[in-house]
């Protein structure tokens, strides 16, 4: 069993485990063990996953509807195990819980070129299967569901908000009489990351971003968290789990997410990004102007902003040492990331 990290233990202790919860399912529970921020259940109907979900019924409904739609033509996604009422969630002790089938297989290893190729092609298939979802919801009278779970056209404004937040962090830290280790690392690195934020916004504003958001065939259900442990490899096929962050958005947003996940542990190896694009396009053709938008998305220093926002806005309650380790790591690969962006511009996007 994988060793639990501190933040995952914090999640697990908030679970309200009770036979009354499990009695709402047609299952006999023999045992349960923790895995990351969920519990694996050993039942009379095989292994299941128990997960406490941190969002409301609107999000639950969106995830259910989107997975049902995708599954019509692409069945390699997570499956919910419904309770006795036929719902995919159970409201218990003021919290929402769901049970899912366990997908047999192994977690994707981005270090394995074959598995990265399988994942990239499968992502193209996943996106194709979600085309038309927005119109499908509107025809069913679910326009509000789309409105509440769509990020189409909002990326530039999101980046501007992140830029302003980072400038505010800098102002606050600059005024501190005593700065801790995190503050000092932040101040040594913030200006070059601010430049990348501004450059990212500039690239997007001069791209066809505002045209793409009007083209239905460029808008899909994006997974938005394509970490290795959310991709299961089985018999040379990729299965996708954990759609907690999924949203309706441009498909290149998901491509950006996958590329960033695949390259950051391998000194931003440009050839990995090339391979992702090649394999994705073998299943789902990309227009040239989409590559221009992808370049702008990749330019944004998401990792740096994420850790600093989590720290200064107290989004995460990690130990101080965890924050310091993370910001050090993210700042150490700045130059590798710069080289990657230059290669991407010169070899993929000649703009």
Image (tube, rainbow, N blue to C red):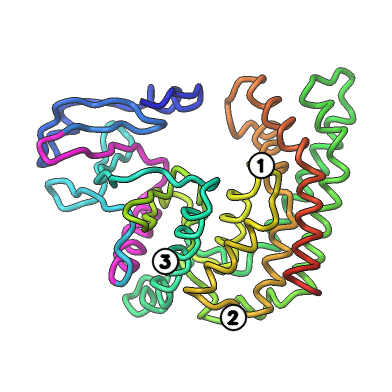
Measured in 3D between alpha carbons, the distance from the residue under mark 1 to the one under mark 2, in whole angstroms, is 29 Å
Numbered badge on residue 306? 1
Q: Which residue is mark 3?
A: 126
Measured in 3D between alpha carbons, the distance from the residue under mark 3 to the one under mark 2, in whole angstroms, is 21 Å
Image height of 192 relative to 209, above or below? above
Q: Which residue is mark 2?
A: 214
Left or right: where 115 falls relative to 268: left
Residue name at image x 14 percent, y 27 percent: 30
Residue extent of the magenta highlight = 43-72
> Of marks 1 and 3, which one's residue comes earlier in the chain?
3
* 118 and 180: which is toward the camera: 118
Q: Residues within 10 Å of mark 2 (few under 14, many from 20)?
A: few
Q: Residues within 10 Å of mark 3 (few under 14, many from 20)?
A: many
Report x, y in % for residue 67: 33, 61
Residue name at image x 59 percent, y 50 percent: 262
The secondary element bearing badge 2 is classed as loop
Quadrant of the image for the C terminus?
Answer: bottom right
């Amino acid at each position: 069993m994988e060793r639990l990290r501190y933040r995952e233990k914090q999640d697990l202790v908030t679970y309200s485990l009770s036979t009354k919860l499990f009695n709402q399912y047609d299952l006999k529970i023999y045992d349960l063990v923790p895995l990351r921020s969920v519990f694996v259940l050993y039942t009379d109907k095989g292994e299941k996953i128990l997960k406490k979900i941190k969002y409301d019924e609107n999000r639950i409904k969106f995830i259910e509807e989107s997975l049902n739609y995708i599954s019509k033509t692409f069945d390699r996604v997570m499956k919910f195990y419904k309770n006795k009422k036929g719902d995919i969630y159970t409201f218990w002790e003021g919290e929402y819980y769901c049970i899912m089938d366990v997908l047999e297989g192994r977690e994707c290893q981005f270090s394995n070129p074959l598995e990265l190729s399988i994942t990239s092609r499968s992502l193209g298939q996943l996106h194709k299967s979600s085309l038309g979802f927005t119109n499908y919801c509107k025809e069913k009278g679910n326009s509000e569901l789309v409105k509440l779970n769509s990020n189409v056209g909002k990326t530039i404004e999101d980046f501007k908000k992140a830029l302003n937040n980072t400038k505010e962090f800098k102002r606050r830290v600059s005024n501190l009489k005593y700065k801790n280790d995190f503050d000092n690392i932040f101040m040594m690195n913030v200006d070059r990351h601010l430049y990348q934020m501004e450059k990212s916004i500039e690239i997007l504003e001069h791209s066809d971003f505002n045209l793409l958001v009007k083209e239905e065939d460029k808008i899909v259900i994006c997974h938005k968290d394509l970490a290795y442990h959310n991709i299961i490899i089985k018999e040379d096929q990729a299965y996708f789990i954990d759609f907690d962050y999924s949203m309706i958005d441009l498909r290149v947003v998901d491509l950006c997410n996958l590329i960033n996940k695949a390259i950051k542990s391998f000194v931003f190896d440009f050839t990995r990004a090339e391979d992702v694009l090649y394999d994705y396009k073998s299943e789902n053709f990309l227009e040239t102007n989409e590559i221009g938008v992808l370049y702008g998305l990749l330019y944004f220093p998401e990792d740096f902003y994420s850790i600093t926002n989590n720290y200064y806005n107290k989004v995460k309650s990690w130990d101080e040492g965890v924050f310091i380790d993370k910001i050090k790591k993210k700042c150490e690969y700045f130059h590798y990331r710069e080289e990657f962006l230059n290669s991407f511009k010169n070899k993929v996007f000649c703009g």
